[in-house]
Amino acid sequence: MESELPMVLNIVEPTLNSHTGHCYSLVDAIAQAAPVDQVHIWAGRESAKFWQGRGRIEPYFFRSIRKFQSYFLFRRLLAGPGKILISTAGTSDLMLLDWAARRRIPEKKVYLYVHWLGAKASKAATLAKVAMAQPNLEIMCATASTTSFFKELGFRSTTVSYPRARVDSSPQSVQAFHHLLFAGAARLDKGFEHIANLVEDLAHTQAHWPIWVQASSTHQTRHEPAILSQITRLRDSGYANLVLMENTLTPTDYQAMFSGAISIQPYSASDFEDRVSGVTLDALSAGCPVVVTANTWLGRVVMKHNAGVATSDLSPLGLKKAVEEVLQDYAGYSLRAAKAGQLLCHEHSAAEMMAAIFQNVTTQSA
């Protein structure tokens, strides 16, 4: 019976090694909301140095061998008490769970959160075999299209809003415009090259807009060569109003960047067509207007709330035009962004995920 299970949740997040990226805020949101007595977080080896949230951190994974380690961890957790949640699940996790189980996994034991489809579509035949062998795996997806994909393969699948930690949802006071901002990890799919192009253009045209660029590495702890070349371009641009932040920021410092900013998010249209962005949610929660790529999840959210400008022109000229449009009514865009942030905070609470996992559990631990 479900009620007889020990009140334990094991969160598996091998890429959780720092505050960088979405992993910290995602796991923090889940751990805060989990209606259980014990939360164990199986994370990267560096995680114990910075984790300050709820739950017991288990610094388990080495990056280079994390898939190998996952197999043995899954065997251990499947044989133990409580539920298992893989908070950033991929194809390899599904395959490793099947191999580690060696028999059918029981109902309501394992939950996998899938953020976007990506390359998983090319693995449909492999995934269908896993669905047949392990029909009790519960797949939770951030978007409806990804949910449909897994359902068609035979999995139990449901759409669950991307969880965010509880934040102060009181109305934000409008700040005067201060700077442009690129926030989050520096990645090609997030249009980092477009940011370098923009900064070079600002330098050449002797513009005066301050621009803050976060160039933190991803969870892999180091930049790929293509990103390093863009950082070099930024350093060599000679733009006096550039603030380049290459170190990982604390959650407090990260959130403070959005005050008085216009968040520029020239993300890849193909990669983010149906993919949730935590940075977009963070910006709106801070009352920060957003310039985003059109025809993306980000663009649809921003345009729905009139909280910024969506554009298909990611050239310096196109981005500057979008920024100028926001600056014509910065206070109005900021107010609408704050209102959108409050609504989205409720829509993206972790309660929906907790309801899907703990359907018969009503006790919330302190």
Image (spheres, rainbow, N blue to C red):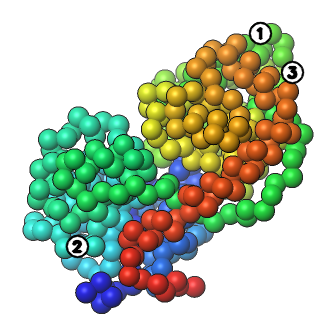
Count of numbered tags: 3
Q: CA distance from mark 3 to mark 2?
A: 59 Å
Task: Tell me, for residue 226, which label it has, or none.
Answer: none
Residue hosting label 2: 107
Q: Is residue 329 visible?
A: yes
Badge 3 density bin: few <14, some 14–19, many ≥20, Cα 10 Å: few
- Give above or below for 1 relative to 226: below
Which of 320 and 229 lies nearest the eye of the viewer?
320
Q: Which mark is residue 204?
A: 1
Gap between marks 3 and 1, in whole Å? 11 Å
Q: Callout 1, which amino acid?
A: His
Position of the C terminus, as image quadrant, is bottom right
Image location of residue 79, percent across then percent down: 21, 77
- Residue underneath mark 3: 208
Q: Helix, strand, or loop for circle 2?
A: loop
- The residue under label 2 is which amino acid type? Glu
Residue 184 appears in the picture as rendered: no
| Secondary structure under the numbered disc 3 in the rendered image | loop
Q: Residue at x 61, y 61 (%)?
A: 346
First in sequence: mark 1 vs mark 2:
2
The quadrant the N terminus occupies is bottom left
**Element carrying mark 1:** helix
Identity, as a three-letter code, of the amino acid under mark 3: His
Crowding near the residue tagged with mark 2, few <14, some 14–19, many ≥20 C-alpha atoms within 10 Å: few
Residue occupying image coordinates x 27% and y 72%: 109
Mark with earlier residue (3, 2) = 2
Q: Is residue 178 above or below residue 24?
A: above
